[in-house]
Amino acid sequence: MKKESFEKAYQAFASTFTSTQSYFGTDAAPYVLAAFTNNKLADLAGTIVQDINDKAPIAKMSVSNLVQFGDNCTWSPSGTVATSDVKLVPCKIWADYEMCYDDLRGVYNGLQNASEQGIEPAQAFMSALQEVFLSEFNKNIMQRALYATGGTGTTVNDCVTGIWEQIITNKVTGSSALTSSNIIAAVEATIQKLDNDVLENAMDNVIVLMNQKMLRIYQSALAASGAAWGFNPATEKPRTYDGFRIETISKMADNHIIVLSTDNLYLGVGSMGEFEQFQIIDFRRTTGDRKFGLSIAGRFDVKVIYEAQAAKWYKV
């Protein structure tokens, strides 16, 4: 089936595109939740806590010296039970974007044939714009979730405290960049920082995080050592280390490795209130400019609940 001409598709889009494309509060939930949960971070998190008004405490408990031995006829409590919590406090994050109507031609040329799929041209335009917009928004969420240092919320690196910054107890450093000759030792040294209980009880959930470049270096190291002989280099390159799953996150820096259990990673998403929104704004109806805007706003936080049960490696 022949693809609709740009002019016909544009007219369909422009005629159906009105100022009613605005969603606030609970009406914005499908768009806002998609922005925060359709990403690698949400896929890896052991728990996603939604609908947080202000903050959500996650209980922590540790015990010691509880067990006693020998005969006992009387109530005799002993030991220590320590309780505390880590709070998920969703931070505001938003994005406003505008685009000239004339630039829609390039967007349309990049679309697959919408008519063949039974999709109206206007809907195809809208879906394509939302996909590109939310993809960029997700990249920034991942940047904050990894490396933000906390603060007032006015720059990309504050408000949320990222996973990397939360891990302070178990650190391994190296003076050289990761190469095929040292990356295996670096991964092992990072895993060795975790205590035996973590490795015993969370073996299936403990993961190694790195970016795609570092994974390729790791795979080259295995190939050089002969350890990857059972894999087809074209289709089955190994993504494990001695049973531990390796996951890649594109926003991680080179020469960075994180090891933690997915059960130890929590993602929090704010409730759908007055701040949460998703809008598509037609400026022809307000300022008269031949352009339109997209806007999204929501709140999120990420926490490593037991910080001492995670580890990281980096070059100094």
Image (cartoon, rainbow, N blue to C red):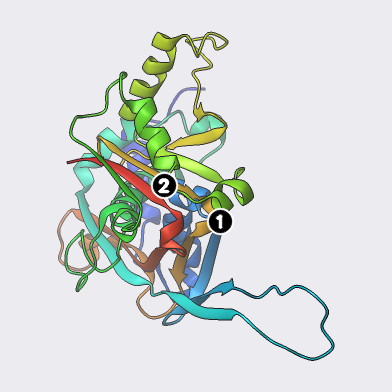
Query: Does residue 128 show up?
Result: yes
Q: Give the residue number, with chain letter if any, for mark 1.
A: 263
6 on left or right of 222: left
Q: Position of residue 129 (x, y in %)?
A: 35, 46
Q: Which residue is mark 2?
A: 193
For image coordinates 69% across by 73% down, the residue present is 67
Amino acid type for the residue under numbered disc 2 = Lys
Quadrant assignment for the C terminus: top left
Q: Residue furthest front?
A: 70
Q: Nearer the viewer, residue 41 or 3?
A: 41
Q: Earlier in the sequence, mark 1 or mark 2?
A: 2
The image shows residue 94 at horizontal and vertical percentages of 28, 64
**Residue depicted at 50% across the width and 51% down the height:** 195
The image quadrant of residue 155 is: bottom left
Instruction: Give the image location of residue 75, x and y in percent.
Output: 77, 91
Instruction: Name the secondary structure under disc 1.
Output: helix
Q: Secondary structure at mark 2?
A: loop
164 lies above or below 206: below
Q: Is residue 224 above or below residue 18?
A: above
Locate residue 1 relative to residue 274 in the image: left or right: right
